[in-house]
Amino acid sequence: MLISYWCGSKVLPGFYYVCRLVIKMLLLLLTHWQVRGKGNVPGRGPLLIVANHINLADPVLIGASLRRKVTFMAKEELFRAPFSRFFMCNFGAFPVRRGRIDRKAFNQANQVLAEGRVLVVFPEGRRSQNNQLQTAFLGSALIALRNGALVLPVGISGSEKIKGLAWMLRRPRVMVNIGNPFYPPSGSGRLTREELAELTDSMMSHIAELLPPEYRGDYAGRGN
């Protein structure tokens, strides 16, 4: 069982499933929530989910949209305040320091996949300010190639409308579009920056295919 030093004994058994149920109920009541491609999610085995990121709600939105329990890589800042740290720890997240190589976070990611579980990462490394895909970092590709894990692209649209209080009255359309899983190419010894960049572009292109054209941003023209 994964219990990290920043969470300690604060991890409550069953919290994840209760929280996921509550989130599902809220999504059904307050949004027009739709999930496509549920059948593309393998029932077991290590899985690396890569998705675009346009709202703070995206991690819990993905968690509510999948039957399998997921673990998130989230920015370190969310673990500093006691309340948000409690929620993040109990909803299956661990921190990563952005803007630098965080070996603890990468080791944690490797452990999640080695245990045959589901890891969710956002290759862009931060929320998009204009709802469009931004140029991604290479970290997600490094995790995928190091572990040879099955990669599952997910495109999220509409969640940017979940802000303030007025959205609850408007019931915005929120789509979680799950694509076809694929394996990264097998590496040949030491990974090169070119190999990482190639896989990163492939991941982002798969995500772009799952999004409406206006969301594709830096990867416009690569989707259908």
Image (cartoon, helix red, strand yellow):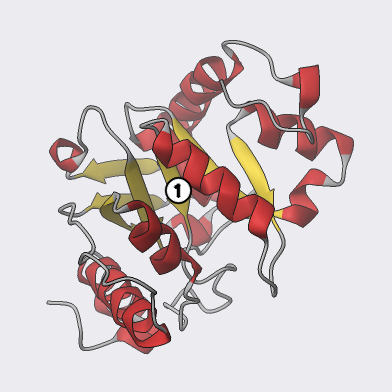
- Residue visible at 70% across and 73% down in the picture: 100
Say if 219 sits above or below 178 in the image.
below
What is the quadrant of the C terminus in the image? bottom left
Residue that protrudes farthest toward the front in the picture: 189
Q: Amino acid at mark 1?
A: Val
Q: Nearer the viewer, residue 148 or 172?
A: 148
Residue 150 image point, x, y percent: 25, 49
Of 124 and 145, nearer the camera is 145
Q: Residue 69, percent across and down?
A: 42, 27
> In this orientation, which residue lies closer to the viewer: 219 or 139?
139
Above or below, 36 against 56 in this view is above
Q: Using a 10 Å C-alpha cutoff, classify the residue at mark 1 as few (fewer than 14 neighbours), some (14 to 19) or many (20 or more).
A: many
* Residue 46 coordinates in the image, percent (x, y): 32, 38
Q: Quadrant location of the N terminus? A: top right
Is disc 1 placed on a helix, strand or loop?
A: strand
Does the rendering let one see residue 35?
yes
Please report the residue visible at 51 percent of the width from the left and 59 percent of the height from the top. Answer: 161
Name the residue at 54% across, 73% down.
Answer: 128
Which of the 4 image quadrants contains residue 211?
Answer: bottom left
Answer with left or right where residue 119 lies relative to residue 204.
Answer: right
Residue at 17% x, 44% y is 37
The residue tagged 1 is: 120
User: On the picture, is 18 further left or further right than 221?
Assistant: right
Question: Can I make out residue 164 in this image?
Answer: no
Residue 9: image quadrant is top right
Q: Measured from the top left, where is residue 86 in percent x and y?
A: 77, 30
